Image (cartoon, rainbow, N blue to C red):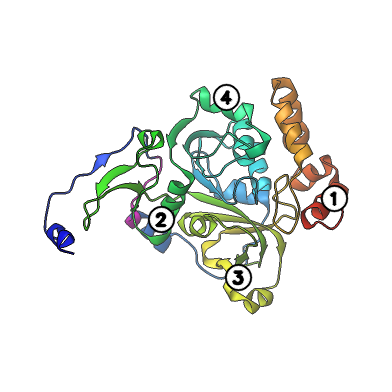
Amino acid sequence: MEEYNKLVKERKVTYRPAGVGEIFTDPDADKARFFFRDEKPRKMVEKTTTVEKAVSELINDGDYIGIGGFGANRTPTAVLHEMLRQKKKNIGLAGHTATHDFQILTAGKCIDRCDIAYIVGLEARGLSKVARKAVESGTIKLTEWTNAALTWRYKAAAMGISFLPVRCMLGTDTEKYSAAMEIECPFTGSKYLAVPALYPDVGIIHVHRADVYGNCQIEGIMVADYDLARAAKKLIITTERLIPNEIIRREPTKTVIPYYLVDAVIEVPFGGYPGTMAYEYFSDEDHLREWMKAENDPETLAAFLDKHIYGVKDFNDYLDTIGGLARLQELRCQENLVEK
């Protein structure tokens, strides 16, 4: 303890940029707190709407968005498709465990800046050629982080502070292309990285069930959704099913996203398709392979996007293009191992 006590004295503190990356969002916790206090509605009122209205009214060109789920799990596909139909532009993205969501948004040319961790790959399925080209061409400004670092950035925002000290990225090339700051621990003198709080303009999360007020319950992995919901200035929820508030109240500890964080609720059955929804349906590997194959040729991709996104009215019409209820029932059986 004598060693630590020597450090407990007033001394000059050094903050050193650890990388060359740009910070795309304002980490000021006080500004965010003023927003949440003065501009965030917190009444327990019905918030059900349509995907079309939610995207039109809550997502503006130039906004920065955060997307929930993990990899191809619980991707809010309906909202992303609608962003393409409404031709949203100059969107900033938290590329936190992004896979098919990044593929969709780059196909629609919606993004112009991105905090990246995992973005181009679709896990074991391979790399998205369109996403890779968008990154390599320099049309999207990039700042690098790890998935953990982006999680801590959401955590800092959810805590109402402007940064968190972390050890991830230290000594790596990711640190060199980040926007983190090197700092010294006031108690031990050890080196840490300070990662700035991340307050997205809009968070978009697909959940298993919610009531009309926005109280949400999620099964399976949560990853950063608990903090993303609390960090986002506006929050769009799509849900597999709407349930009565009385059922929510029977098990209140399962409500991981409370109503006062939520701005819009839309019931979208199979809303995570073509990804996985734990205990609901498995990912449609055939459709994802078709996506990847279509990316080999611009004309084929244009026809693919027209068939599945631009040429349909809404998400339900999209589901009809991939085989409708019969195909979805196959994926439900596959997820729950009911039958082969």
Give the residue type at disc 3.
Lys
Image location of residue 160, percent across then percent down: 37, 60
Please tell me in which quadrant of the rendered image residue 157 appears: bottom left
The alpha-carbon separation of the residues under discs 2 and 4 comes to 32 Å
Which three-letter amino acid code belongs to the residue tagged 2?
A: Ala
Identify the mark at residue 330; answer none if there is no mark. 1
Q: Kindly identify which residue carries mark 2.
A: 157
Is 51 or 57 nearer to us in this picture? 51
* Residue 254 numbered mark, or none: 3
Q: Position of residue 95 (x, y in %)?
A: 52, 41
Identify the residue at horizontal 55%, vertical 50% (top origin). Answer: 58
x then y, percent, for residue 267 = 71, 58
SS at mark 1 in the image: helix
User: Earlier along the polypeptide chain: callout 1 or callout 3?
Assistant: 3
* Residue 255 falls in image quadrant: bottom right
Residue type beneath disc 4: Lys
Callout 2 environment at 10 Å: few (<14), some (14 to 19), or many (20+)?
many
Left or right of 153 in this view: 312: right
| Residue 109 makes an appearance in the image | yes
Label 3, label 2: how far apart the Cα atoms are: 22 Å
